[in-house]
Image (tube, grey):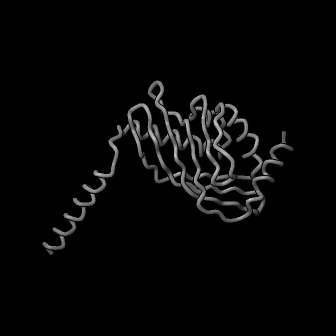
C-alpha cells in the first residue's frame, strides 16, 4: 500500500515538473484575455455577431488559409475581412467552430503566439461539411487588451461536402 501511494505521489510530482519545464510563464489574466480573443472570433462568427468578431482583431490582420484553398496569405483591414465573412457564413443554415487545447507558444507581455485545435461544422439542409486541424495565432497587446493580428489555419482532415462553401456563398449573395 505504501509503495503504491509513493509511486502515485512520485508520478504526480514528475508530471508537474515536466509540465512546468515545457510551459511558458504567462500572467493568468493575460492567458484568459488571449483565449477570450480567440474564442470571440469563432463564437462571434457562428452567431453572426460581427462586432464581437471585429473587437478581437487589430486594425490589419493577416489570414493564411493556404492549406485549405492554396494561394497566398492575405493581409487586409480587419473591417474588410469581417465584410467577407459576413457575406459568406450566413449562407449556411448553421455553423459551429470549436476551438480548444489553447497553447501559448510565445509570450513577451505585449505579443503572444498561440496554437489551438479546431473543428468546424457547416450545414445546409441535411448536407454537412466538417473540417479540423490547427490554428496558429499571433496576438498583440494594446491598451491592456489582446487582439489577433495573424491567423494560420492548418487543415488536417475533412469529411462531408466541401461544395457547401460555394453553395453558402451563393445563398448569402442572393439574400442581400
- Quadrant location of the C terminus? top right
- Quadrant location of the N terminus? bottom left
Q: Quadrant of residue 120?
A: bottom right
Residue found at x 42% / y 45%: 104
Q: Residue furthest top?
A: 143
Residue found at x 44% / y 34%: 111
Q: Residue furthest right?
A: 174
Q: Residue furthest front?
A: 72
Q: Nearer the viewer, residue 156 or 102?
A: 156
* Residue 149 picture location, percent across and down: 55, 35
Q: Nearer the viewer, residue 149 or 146?
A: 149
User: Is 161 drawn above or below residue 21 in the view shown?
Assistant: below
Count of marks placed on residues: 0
* 29 lies left or right of 123: left
User: Is 3 drawn above or below residue 158 in the view shown?
Assistant: below
* Residue 162 picture location, percent across and down: 73, 59
Q: Nearer the viewer, residue 102 or 61?
A: 61
Q: Residue furthest bottom?
A: 1
Q: Quadrant of residue 56?
A: top right
Residue found at x 31% / y 54%: 19
User: Is 130 drawn above or below residue 70 in the view shown?
Assistant: below
Amino acid at each position: 500500500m505504501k509503495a503504491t501511494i509513493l509511486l502515485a505521489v512520485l508520478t504526480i510530482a514528475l508530471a508537474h515538473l515536466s509540465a512546468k519545464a515545457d510551459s511558458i510563464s504567462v500572467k493568468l489574466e493575460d492567458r484568459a484575455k488571449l483565449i477570450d480573443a480567440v474564442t470571440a472570433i469563432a463564437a462571434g462568427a457562428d452567431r453572426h455577431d460581427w462586432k464581437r468578431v471585429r473587437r478581437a482583431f487589430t486594425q490589419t490582420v493577416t489570414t493564411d488559409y493556404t492549406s485549405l484553398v492554396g494561394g497566398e496569405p492575405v493581409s487586409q483591414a480587419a473591417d474588410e475581412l469581417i465584410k467577407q465573412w459576413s457575406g459568406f457564413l450566413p449562407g449556411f443554415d448553421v455553423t459551429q467552430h470549436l476551438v480548444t487545447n489553447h497553447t501559448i507558444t510565445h509570450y513577451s507581455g505585449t505579443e503572444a503566439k498561440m496554437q489551438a485545435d479546431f473543428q468546424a461544422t457547416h450545414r445546409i439542409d441535411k448536407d454537412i461539411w466538417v473540417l479540423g486541424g490547427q490554428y496558429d495565432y499571433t496576438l498583440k497587446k494594446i491598451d491592456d487588451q489582446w487582439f489577433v493580428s495573424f491567423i494560420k489555419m492548418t487543415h488536417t482532415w475533412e469529411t462531408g461536402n466541401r461544395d457547401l462553401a460555394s453553395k453558402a456563398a451563393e445563398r448569402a449573395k442572393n439574400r442581400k
